[in-house]
Image: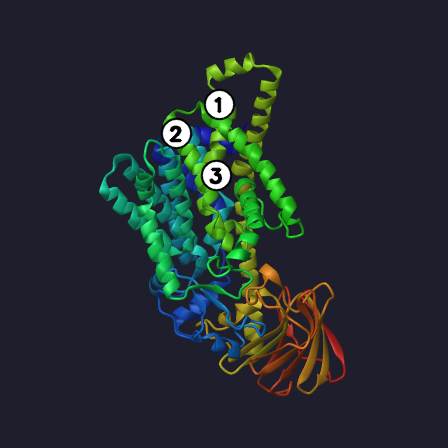
Amino acid sequence: MVGPSWLARRIARLPSWAGLAVVLVLGSIVHFPALRAELMLDDFLHSSMLEGTFPVARHPLDLYNFVDDSDRAILLERGLLPWWSHPALTIRFFRPLSSGLLWADHALLGEGALSRHVHSYLWWVLAVVAAAALLRRSFSPRVAWMATFAYALAPCHAMPLAWIANREVLVSLAFGTAALIAYLRWREQRRPGDAALAALLFSGALLAGEYGLSFGGYVLALEIVRRGERLLPRASGLLPFAVPASAYLGVRAYLGYGAIGSGYYLDPFREPVLFLWMAPRRLAMLLGEAWFSLDQDTLTWSIPSWAMVIGALALGGAITTTFVRSIRRLEAAPRRAAIWMALGSCFALVPVLAVVPGPRLIGASVLGIAAAAALIIDAAWFPSDAELEARAHASASRRRIVEASGLIALALAFFQLVHGPAIAWIMGRHFRSTSVGFARQLHSLRERIGDPSTADVVVVRGMAGAFFAPFGVDPAGMAPARFRVLAFTGHVLVQRRGPRTLDIIAAHDRGLFPGGEANLFLAGVTLHDGDVFEAAGMRVTLLEVEQGLPRIARFELAEAFDAPRLVWLNETDKAYFDGTPPAEGFGRPYDFDH
């Protein structure tokens, strides 16, 4: 078979440095589109914070503090948070190391996107090098390089490479994987220096971001698999991770980091029941993404949760059975390594169940999944002479089991070694295209706003980009004096009721803003007809709530609609266009497609 598996077999015969070089070159090609992306999403907020133009000053180590109690009112009054935001909305993450790296970017590299992408790329290289070292110390060269190939070219790296603000994932992966190597050395040789090094590296993974918690899954799995020790010594083996993790979580809680009132982020410490309720579906989605390179376009929310969970259990059972059969051929040490890495890949998903599923969350888990898939492929495609002899004399039922295992191995080879890299390249191109398109949107916005320091912008109907656009209007990140988004949906009808009043009506199957996990700014609040919101110099009254979301709302502004400083806009898929309300007593549709 000519393809990535054939290439991985050839790489396995190369010296270790040459094989690693080949994987890095191939990974660079696959991820090249992602490295060409422009600024995205939170990148604009970070630029504003670093330039000192964000409405509230941020410390260089606190750039992931987007909304907290001290500045929520200011952001609401400026319209930089939408009118429907949760009254206690908090979105702030304890990532001092990653924040400091962003500050270093700004101080040393300037504002260009390419140089900062190169910085992210170097962390990806470190993560791949560490993964290769971990896999080579545990498995045969062929298995190690197949797993390294699958890991390096996996779709989970596309967004962290394309989105500078998401670099913390790569930093956590680099530190966390290196920490696992030091941890293994300590458990094997009992040198205190290795335990201290592991704790230091785990601390780096955690200070980069909460993704570092995922590596605790591997530490726990390794201690479960270890034999010949009593419970207390095995429990003490958790200390190199448990001590820095406890300190990280304690400081995080003491300083009030986390998320409150957001549908996108779910804090398991504040909402444990909801976290457990959502966990099965999210886990099924993440496993589908990790094993088969599937995403939200395939695993849509239209699929019932029970069907997704049952499907995950069925596929998981088949893969687990094949995996158990595949590792029987291994000696004791690599067999234990296979088990703890596979088990750890599942445990590693638990911390990221707090976020809406996406490939960027599964980097730590993919490390163990790539190893398990490589072991299954190796057992099916490269049997020993004794295994071939046994198959030749096997019963019909035994041969059917072997054939089924071969089909599963073939499927995993396709998804891990062919489909995964292809999806990573496609995702990179998508992020590049999306970021370039948004840059064009910003250009049209600048032309219509003029001087942002005095502009009072009203976006009648906007989409997701409208909440990051204010910080991209000015090269220094200065947002307009006000930037109000009235509706966040694809199509609305606007009816002018008076000189300062209009009604906005959404379609029957849509709200004026999304609900559930798609709503970054509001969760856990039941809306009713007649509810009133006051923010950013306007009063919003919900006239009709349908299926928990407002379908019709009345907007009353403090100033007349024809006030000179008001700039009325409609955000479309191509640019910002004039959004001046219709004459009094008339209506007008506003659409996303222009």
Q: Which residue occupies 51% across, 13% down?
A: 389
Amino acid under disc 3: Ile
Q: Quadrant of the N terminus?
A: top right
Q: Quadrant of the C terminus?
A: bottom right
> What residue does disc 1 label?
382
Badge 1 amino acid: Phe
- Label 3 sits on a secondary structure element that is helix
Any mark on residue 369, and which? 3
Look at label 2 and name its amino acid. Answer: Pro
Q: Residue at x 60, y 82 (%)?
A: 538
Pick the front one: 528 or 429:
528
Distance from Cα at disc 2 to Cα at disc 1:
17 Å
**Residue at the spot x=63%, y=49% of the render?**
305
Mark 2 = which residue? 334
Q: Position of residue 537 (x, y in %)?
A: 57, 83
Estimate the x, y position of residue 503 in percent, counting from the top left. 70, 78
The local crowd at label 3, few if under 14, some if 14 to 19, many if 20 or more residues have their Cα within 10 Å, is many
Task: Name the secondary structure under disc 2.
Answer: helix
Q: CA distance from mark 3 to mark 2?
A: 15 Å
